[in-house]
Amino acid sequence: MGANAFAFLSGREMELGACPNAIVVRVSFTGELGYEIYLPADYQRGLYEELTTQGRALGLRPFGSRALLSLRVEKGFPSWGVDLSPDYSPFEPGLDRFVRLDKPDFIGKAATQARAAAGAPKERLVTLTVEADGTDCFGGEAIYRNGELAGYVTSGTYGHAVKESLALGYVRSPHVEDGAALEVEVVGQRRPARLSTRPRYDPDGQRMRG
């Protein structure tokens, strides 16, 4: 996930293993209750080994980036450099709820105010369930509605928890309707897809509040 801009403000400093001042942040990129830990590199290996040892009885084990991709797409979490980029303001991916335009000043405030005054964004980031027939989206696939180009995929994967082939993508706002029938071009073939305006996994976010 990388360090959030607010992480060190909302985190708690505590002693973990041999590290006297680890910063622990309650934040998750998986859709489950989770934490990120920030600490000097000198302590990382020792803390990793201790967490692995202590967590073994609980079934704790490492998992890879492809598993993380599956989890975050199920939850509808966008990732910087993939679903988020300088090409978009906070409004297209629905991150404007984190922007306080009443703050005295911040970098980009004037541009963000102008964007907010312009009204609804032309595109919105949505979740798609795709009838992929065993070939999941990867990113960059075209999205169509009634034969008209409607957007493009930014992330794609199989959602193992929800048992669906999923994609995140930007779709032009007039096409953003929950349950809208779309098509996604996957390996040269247009596959039926459904638009979802809510995450496919735990849409109300109850598990992250556990």
Image (cartoon, rainbow, N blue to C red):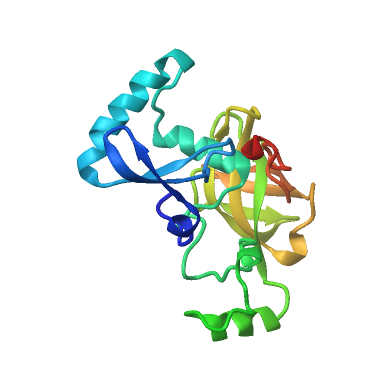
Q: Is residue 139 visible?
A: yes
Residue located at (68% from left, 48% from top): 183
> Toward which corner of the image does residue 31 lie, by quadrant?
top right
198 horizontally vs 74: left or right: right
> Toward which corner of the image does residue 192 lie, by quadrant?
top right
Q: Is 159 situated above or below 187?
A: above
Residue located at (71% from left, 56% from top): 147
Q: Nearer the viewer, residue 24 or 81?
A: 24
On the image, the x and y values in percent for residue 78 come to 54, 52
> Toward which corner of the image does residue 120 lie, by quadrant?
bottom right
On the image, the x and y values in percent for residue 50 come to 31, 25
On the image, the x and y values in percent for residue 29 come to 52, 43
Q: Is 141 situated above or below 100?
A: above
On the image, the x and y values in percent for residue 59 come to 46, 17
Q: Is residue 92 visible?
A: no
Q: Nearer the viewer, residue 175 or 184?
A: 175
Residue located at (38% from left, 20% from top): 54
Question: As drawn, which residue projects farthest toward the left?
Answer: 42
161 horizontally vs 179: left or right: left
Residue located at (60% from left, 70% from top): 99
Q: Nearer the viewer, residue 134 or 30?
A: 30
Q: Is 107 situated above or below 41?
A: below
Q: Quadrant of the C terminus?
A: top right
